[in-house]
Image (spheres, rainbow, N blue to C red):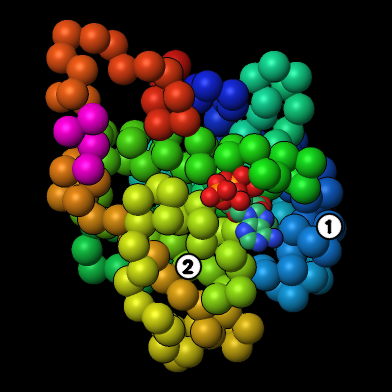
């Protein structure tokens, strides 16, 4: 399944995307708040990231979505919407990573908005959450623009293997809030199609 937004095409990651993902993860600016700047190894992407995502797509219908510019067909980055490993409730975890050339255009918000819409309209997901380093202002702005709110100021370090992300902040959007915030906008234009924009997802099989 592909998902189309105004400027992007999203599709599930494939093994042949490995060089694109690796190049993305070798930019220290991209990795600043993820690993402190260190690159991910090509083997980790090939042997762990992509197979794990493919298993997630098989089991849950969502995983790592790679994003391409619709006009130029260039790789823009990815958005990962996945079922968390330890979760007793129907919830999904969101993360995103774009090539530096694709920053500052609202593309992360556009792609994530589409995936959140698909998740809340086609699955029983009750909550979508995302976490980031407290200094990652760009990422937190994206979360706020997605209609997420701060869930916990500091997650407990024992939830994480890596001390670097032990102090992350978590944002969340609950299905009921998403519906409430979405419905008035639709109702305000009765009888008209909603204009296509960052929040409008179009799915093609
Ligand atoms: C985080 C990331 C996905 C944001 O993507 P993006 O498409 O550039 O996001 P946007 O264009 O919507 O910009 C985000 C907001 O940050 C703001 N911003 C940009 N640079 C900023 C800075 N240096 N300081 C403060 N705010 C900044 C922008 O103004 C924008 O807010 P606005 O729309 O209210 O003006 C992108 O920067 C990225 O891939 N970073 C590296 C990976 C990463 O950190 N991922 C998140 C880890 S959870």
Q: Nearer the viewer, residue 60 or 178?
A: 178
Classify residue 114 as left or right of residue 98: left
The quadrant where residue 159 appears: bottom left
195 to 84, vertically: above or below: above
Residue 183 counted in the magenta span: yes
Q: Position of residue 119 (x, y in %)?
A: 32, 40
Q: Secondary structure under badge 1?
A: loop
88 to 144, vertically: above or below: below
Q: Nearer the viewer, residue 97 or 82?
A: 97
Task: Answer few, some or many: residues within 10 Å of disc 1's Cα (few below 14, many 20 plus, some between 14 and 19).
Answer: some
Which quarter of the figure is the C terminus placed in? top left
Whether the residue carrying mark 2 lies under 8 Å from ligand 1 is answered with yes
162 to 124, vertically: above or below: below
9 to 32, vertically: above or below: above
Most common SS among magenta residues: helix
Identify the mark nearer the N-term, 2 or 1. 1
Q: Position of residue 126 (x, y in %)?
A: 21, 53
For residue 131, the mark is 2
| Magenta stretch in the rendered image | 181-185
Q: Which residue is mark 1?
A: 27
Whether the residue carrying mark 1 lies under 8 Å from ligand 1 is answered with no
Decide: marks 2, 1 in contact (CB < 8 A)? no
Q: Position of residue 109 (x, y in %)?
A: 51, 43
Q: Position of residue 37 (x, y in %)?
A: 79, 70
The quadrant where residue 132 appears: bottom right
Task: Answer few, some or many: residues within 10 Å of disc 2's Cα (few below 14, many 20 plus, some between 14 and 19).
Answer: many
Residue occupying image coordinates x 61% and y 74%:
135
């Amino acid at each position: 399944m592909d998902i189309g937004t105004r400027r992007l095409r999203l599709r599930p990651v494939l093994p042949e995307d490995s060089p694109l993902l690796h190049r993305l993860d070798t930019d220290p600016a991209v990795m600043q708040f993820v690993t402190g700047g260190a690159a991910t190894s090509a083997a980790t992407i090939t042997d762990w990231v992509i197979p794990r995502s493919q298993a997630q797509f098989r089991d849950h219908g969502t995983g790592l979505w790679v994003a391409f510019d619709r006009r130029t067909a260039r790789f823009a980055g990815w958005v990962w919407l996945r079922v968390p490993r330890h979760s007793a409730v129907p919830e999904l975890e969101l993360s995103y990573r774009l090539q530096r050339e694709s920053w500052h255009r609202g593309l992360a918000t556009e792609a994530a908005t589409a995936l959140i819409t698909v998740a809340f309209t086609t699955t029983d997901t009750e909550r979508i959450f995302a976490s980031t380093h407290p200094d990652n202002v760009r990422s937190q702005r994206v979360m706020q623009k997605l209609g997420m709110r701060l869930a916990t100021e500091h997650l407990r370090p024992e939830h994480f293997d890596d001390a670097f992300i032990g102090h992350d902040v978590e944002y969340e959007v609950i299905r009921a809030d998403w519906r409430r915030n979405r419905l008035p906008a639709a109702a305000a234009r009765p009888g008209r199609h909603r204009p296509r924009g960052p929040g409008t997802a179009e799915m093609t099989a």
